[in-house]
Amino acid sequence: MEIKDFILASGSPQRIALLRQIAYEPKAIQPADIDEECLPHEMPLPYVRRMALEKAKAVAKLKENENILACDTVVCVGSRIFHKAKDIEEQRKYMQLLSGRAHRVISSVCLINKNGKVSQRTVSTKIVMKRMSKEEIEDYLQSGEWQGVCGYKIEGLLGGYVTKIVGSYSGVVGLPLSETMNLLKGEGIK
């Protein structure tokens, strides 16, 4: 696969695999080291857009005159943002809240080009999950699949509990592919 002229501001294996799926191999991977705490009263959409932009800016400072691609993805129920669970108890609470209801997964992708121009696209996807029994939740928790991700991996075991998706499947995995490809092509990165 041909290396493309951009740096990915993420070490996420899911994002790397998604980029490869559309034949975009970054020339380097440089995860952003930023504070991901919510601001007081910050809603999910502004939060995820800010995080994607801050990640891109942080890496752009380290890698001048480069195209920087960053993304952030959150799971939310109403205005409540789910961050990576600290432990199995917190993840159990997340699963109980998600079970049997609709929620949103928002992904924002941001590209800062070599001249500092910022382009950003954000996608909100509605997910409906079936009601999970206590046993199903416990089986999912014991799988450990939830560790290191915000909420869950739709491409894993939990996909069996999703009854409806309205929006971008790849955005739920962690990188909305159509929007990403359009941003990169818009900068002449083909």
Image (spheres, rainbow, N blue to C red):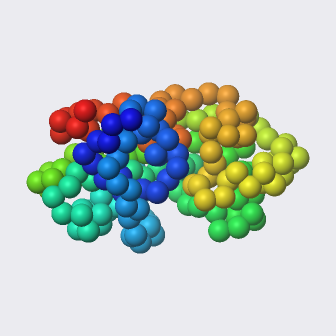
Horizontal side of 167 relative to 142 (left or right) equals left
Task: Name the residue at the front extreme.
Answer: 1
Task: Name the residue at the right extreme.
Answer: 135
Give the residue drawn at x 70%, y 59%. Answer: 91
Horizontal side of 171 relative to 140 (left or right) equals left
Give the residue drawn at x 79%, y 41%. Answer: 132
x, y percentage for residue 172?
52, 40
Work out which quarter of the rendered image holds the N terminus and state it. Answer: top left
Say if residue 129 shows up in the picture. no
Say if residue 1 shows up in the picture. yes
Work out which quarter of the rendered image holds the C terminus and state it. Answer: top left
Would you place residue 183 above or below residue 78 in this image? above
Q: Nearer the viewer, residue 106 or 11?
A: 11
Horizontal side of 56 relative to 177 (left or right) equals left
x, y percentage for residue 45?
40, 50
Task: Name the residue at the left extreme.
Answer: 115
Q: Nearer the viewer, residue 152 or 177?
A: 177
x, y percentage for residue 59?
30, 63
Give the residue drawn at x 39%, y 50%. Answer: 71
Q: Nearer the viewer, residue 82 or 42?
A: 82
